């Protein structure tokens, strides 16, 4: 293994999957209860996008994925993609929306990422663990290029935009992109799921690099999608009475405070 190679490995008992599936049902139910229909739809769609990337690109194209013999890579990746794709983008959409209950949603999601591995350790018994991992050397450069081009676009837009109220809030977007990934990477690491059996350096590299790169690379593009969709539709999936431009939508979001409503 090259020194620069980063291996993202997870080791967990099958019970972990069943507990997490129960949480996903709970989270979806709470979103329905609070009429967060658009957020729920985005999370579901992005779960399938994660699956297309993880199985289609990382596995079929880059051959970067492997799993303990005896377990299905397809089904485990489908769960992982739907789990983190759904949860990540539900949380991201709530952040971008500056939802009035952002603190409560954040506590729910982060506490689950921390508690699920610990519950599994206690109640899984002698279940044979699933070990799944991927190498990153074949595609991290491409991901870095996507990240740079996205934030370059935001920087150029802000330099061009004379009206400060219509500039993208880059620190807010960066915070979302970094902290969402850091939240579940830290939960996996503290719970003994991430990088089991690795040295301290090998454990910390995925935490730091993935937090800066992997979810964050998509944030400028997700921000643009968020603006385009919410300029036309409400959280209840109804057309807005007044459709607005993207710059006007930026102005609306910038003027909004998280704890309003």
Image (spheres, helix red, strand yellow):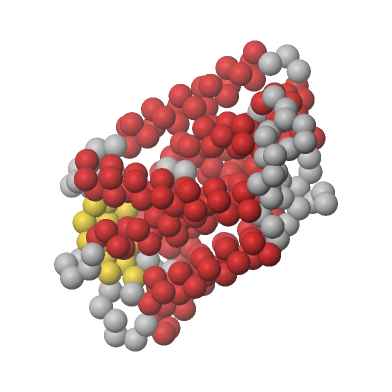
Which quarter of the picture shows residue 106?
A: bottom right
Residue 79 located left or right of residue 107: left
Closest to the observer, 54 or 209: 54
**Foreground of the two, 42 or 110:** 42
Q: Quadrant of residue 252?
A: top right
Name which residue lies at 55% across and 51% down: 41
Residue 229 percent across, percent down from the top left: 62, 36
| Residue drawn at x 51%, y 66% as measured from the top left | 24
Q: Residue at x 20, y 66 (%)?
A: 68
* Residue for point 38% across, 59% down: 80
Q: Residue 251 appears at what percent x and percent y?
A: 75, 29
User: Image height check: is 122 above or below 81?
Assistant: below
Q: In the rendering, at what x and y percent does residue 59 appear?
A: 24, 48
Camera-side residue: 16 or 28?
28
Residue 96 is at least partly visible in this image: yes
**Image vertical order of residue 62 relative to residue 132, above or below:** above
């Amino acid at each position: 293994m090259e020194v620069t190679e980063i291996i993202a490995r997870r080791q967990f008992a099958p019970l972990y999957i069943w507990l997490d599936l129960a949480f996903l049902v709970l989270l979806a139910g709470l979103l329905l209860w609070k009429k967060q229909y658009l957020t729920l739809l985005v999370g579901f769609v992005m779960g399938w996008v994660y699956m297309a990337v993880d199985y289609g690109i990382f596995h079929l194209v880059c051959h970067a994925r492997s799993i303990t013999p005896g377990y299905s890579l397809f089904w485990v990746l489908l769960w992982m993609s739907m789990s983190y794709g759904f949860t990540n983008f539900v949380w991201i959409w709530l952040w971008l929306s500056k939802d009035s209950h952002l603190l409560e949603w954040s506590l729910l999601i982060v506490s689950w990422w921390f508690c699920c591995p610990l519950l599994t350790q206690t109640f899984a018994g002698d279940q044979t663990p699933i070990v799944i991992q991927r190498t990153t050397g074949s595609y991290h450069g491409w991901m870095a290029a996507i990240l740079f081009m996205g934030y370059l676009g935001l920087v150029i837009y802000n330099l061009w935009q004379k009206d400060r109220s219509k500039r993208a809030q880059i620190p807010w977007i960066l915070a979302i992109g970094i902290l969402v990934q850091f939240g579940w990477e830290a939960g996996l690491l503290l719970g003994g799921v991430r990088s089991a059996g690795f040295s301290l350096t090998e454990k910390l590299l995925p935490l730091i690099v993935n937090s800066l790169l992997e979810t964050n690379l998509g944030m400028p593009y997700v921000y643009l999608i968020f603006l385009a969709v919410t300029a036309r539709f409400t959280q209840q999936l109804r057309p807005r009475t007044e459709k607005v431009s993207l710059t006007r939508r930026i102005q609306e979001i910038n003027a909004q405070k998280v704890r309003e409503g």
